[in-house]
């Protein structure tokens, strides 16, 4: 059991997340057994990430963001991977970890990149958010880069974004960053002439920026929200499906070389 000691050697591992004080387990200074039964899971998540307990409106928006991440059907890469790895005969933890490993720039990971852009670009001295959005979109277009947090395979408008936007307004989190996020969507759509909606990743990126949560937590928040969904998919795979799932013949195309004969090796002299 590690005690927090004044002036301990800098060679020691350090943490301000949790430890033991006078033999009592603490998380960010609060006794863990007092947190149990007194705070919700979302409040505890906010506490470990941000260092303080949330206010009531912070708690409500945190709950809403985590619920928005929880599942999005069997189709996304994370669920296909988790179920496939389980189907190959691996344990639940390996299958869920495989699902988490797919969360990258195009799936879930966009929160981190998008919040980084918002937090680095929208400094306090920006006076006109819409004019600045136009400048930032032009910079991305010049570099031929996709704007993280925009676009969706299924939606012209992401329903999760619309609901979170409604709640952000209700709880007082629809300020400069949210205005910037929506202005970027307007610029991207005006330039491309196609729907490029602010997706759930982009909306969460804007809200955490409003809340003063560093972009470095972005991917983590998605992972925390999506893991219960991944666990549910793996347990369902376990209960309902036979092992060794594979693509059925006829559901994929082979477009390689036609059938051909293997060259015969010349007999050595
Ligand atoms: C999510 C995503 C993969 C969906 O892609 P899609 O709807 O299948 O779109 P496509 O990959 O077919 O792209 C269609 C066009 O839109 C453009 N486009 C798509 N998303 C774009 C974005 N975020 N920024 C700029 N242009 C984008 C593509 O460049 C492409 O243009 P082109 O036809 O001139 O080459 C894509 O929008 C994307 O990469 N978004 C950024 C990452 C992100 O936010 N992921 C989280 C998803 S919830």
Image: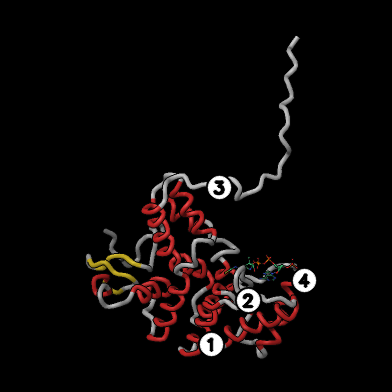
Measured Cα–Cα span from mark 3 to mark 2:
31 Å
In this rendering, the answer to whether 181 lies above or below 99 is below
In this rendering, the answer to whether 228 lies above or below 165 is above
Instruction: Indicate which quadrant contains ligand 1.
Output: bottom right
The 10 Å Cα crowd at callout 2, few under 14, some 14 to 19, many 20 or more, is: some
Measured Cα–Cα span from mark 1 to mark 2:
21 Å
Pick the residue in front: 24 or 158: 158
Question: Mark 1 = which residue?
Answer: 174
Q: Is residue 10 visible?
A: no
Question: Mark 3 = which residue?
Answer: 248
Disc assigned to residue 142: 4
Task: Using residue 13 as the reference point, say whether residue 69 is left or right of it.
Answer: right
Across and down, in percent, residue 130 comes to 68, 87
Sequence-earlier tag: 1 or 3:
1
SS for callout 2: loop
SS for callout 1: loop
Which is in the foreground here, disc 3 or disc 2? 3
SS for callout 3: loop
């Amino acid at each position: 059991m590690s005690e927090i000691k004044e002036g301990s050697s800098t060679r020691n591992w350090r943490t301000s997340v949790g430890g033991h004080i006078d033999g009592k387990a603490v998380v960010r200074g609060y006794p863990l057994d007092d947190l149990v039964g007194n705070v919700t899971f979302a409040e505890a998540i906010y506490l470990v990430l941000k260092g303080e307990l949330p206010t009531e409106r912070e708690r409500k928006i945190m709950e809403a963001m985590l619920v928005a991440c929880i599942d999005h059907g069997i189709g996304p890469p994370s669920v296909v991977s988790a179920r496939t790895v389980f189907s190959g005969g691996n344990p639940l933890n390996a299958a869920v970890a495989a699902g988490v490993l797919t969360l990258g720039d195009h799936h879930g990971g966009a929160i981190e990149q998008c919040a980084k852009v918002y937090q680095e670009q929208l400094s306090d001295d920006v006076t006109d958010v819409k004019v600045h959005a136009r400048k930032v979109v032009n910079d991305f277009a010049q570099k031929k880069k996709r704007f993280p947090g925009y676009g969706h395979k299924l939606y012209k408008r992401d329903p999760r974004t619309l609901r979170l936007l409604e709640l952000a307004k209700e709880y007082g989190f629809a300020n400069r960053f949210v205005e910037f996020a929506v202005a970027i969507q307007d610029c991207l759509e005006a330039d491309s002439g196609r729907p490029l909606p602010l997706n759930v990743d982009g909306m969460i990126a804007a809200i955490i920026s409003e809340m003063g949560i560093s972009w470095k937590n972005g991917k983590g928040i998605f992972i925390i929200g999506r893991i219960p969904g991944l666990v549910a998919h793996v347990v369902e795979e376990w209960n309902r499906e036979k092992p060794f799932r594979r693509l059925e013949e006829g559901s994929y195309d082979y477009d390689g070389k036609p059938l051909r004969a293997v060259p015969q090796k010349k007999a050595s002299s």
